[in-house]
Image: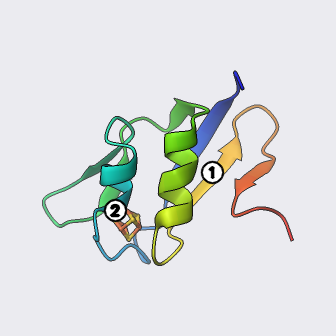
């Protein structure tokens, strides 16, 4: 892949399930309030990051291509 992805978590939506941390432990952390944060605002494109976004039960995670802003997840309708 080789792209850089911008990763965002909507904390008003996150319910702190921790599934993203399980899917991509290098890219997500839970804070003391059990809210998920990206470890870095940008990450190398990786299946684990996509799996975390797809696996979030409340779709709190959005991923876009850092350069172009193109939607990775959720995909554009
Ligand atoms: S999987 Fe979704 S709801 Fe669960 S901690 Fe991660 S962002 Fe929050």
SS for dot 2? helix
Does 69 sit above or below residue 10? above
The residue carrying mark 2 is: 19
The percent coordinates of residue 46 (x first, y second) are 57, 35
Q: Quadrant of the C terminus?
A: bottom right
Q: Given the current orientation, which residue lies at the most extreme right position?
A: 77
Residue positioned 63% across, 37% down in the render: 5
Residue positioned 32% across, 58% down in the render: 36
> 33 or 19: which is nearer to us?
19
Q: Nearer the viewer, mark 2 or mark 1?
A: 2
Would residue 73 be found to the left or right of residue 53 on screen? right
> 63 or 48: which is nearer to us?
48
Q: Given the current orientation, which residue lies at the most extreme left position?
A: 32
Q: Is mark 2 within 8 Å of ligand 1?
A: yes
Q: How many marks are shown on the rendered structure? A: 2
**Scheme of image coloration:** rainbow
Would residue 55 be found to the left or right of residue 62 on screen? left
The residue carrying mark 1 is: 63
Residue positioned 83% across, 64% down in the render: 76
Does 19 sit above or below residue 13? above
The percent coordinates of residue 72 (x first, y second) are 72, 51
SS for dot 1? strand
Q: Report the disc number at residue 74.
A: none
Q: In the rendered image, which quarter is residue 42 located in? A: top right
The percent coordinates of residue 60 (x first, y second) are 50, 69
Would residue 52 be found to the left or right of residue 47 on screen? left
- For the residues labelled 2 and 1, the Cα–Cα distance comes to 16 Å
Q: Residues within 10 Å of mark 1 (few under 14, many from 20)?
A: many
Which quadrant does ligand 1 occupy?
bottom left
């Amino acid at each position: 892949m080789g792209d850089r992805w911008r990763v965002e978590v909507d904390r008003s939506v996150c319910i702190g399930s921790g599934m993203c941390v399980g899917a991509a432990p290098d890219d997500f952390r839970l804070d003391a309030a059990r809210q998920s944060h990206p470890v870095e605002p940008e990450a190398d494109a990786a299946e684990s990051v996509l799996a975390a976004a797809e696996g979030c039960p409340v779709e709190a995670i959005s991923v876009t291509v850092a350069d172009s802003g193109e939607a990775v997840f959720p995909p554009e309708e």
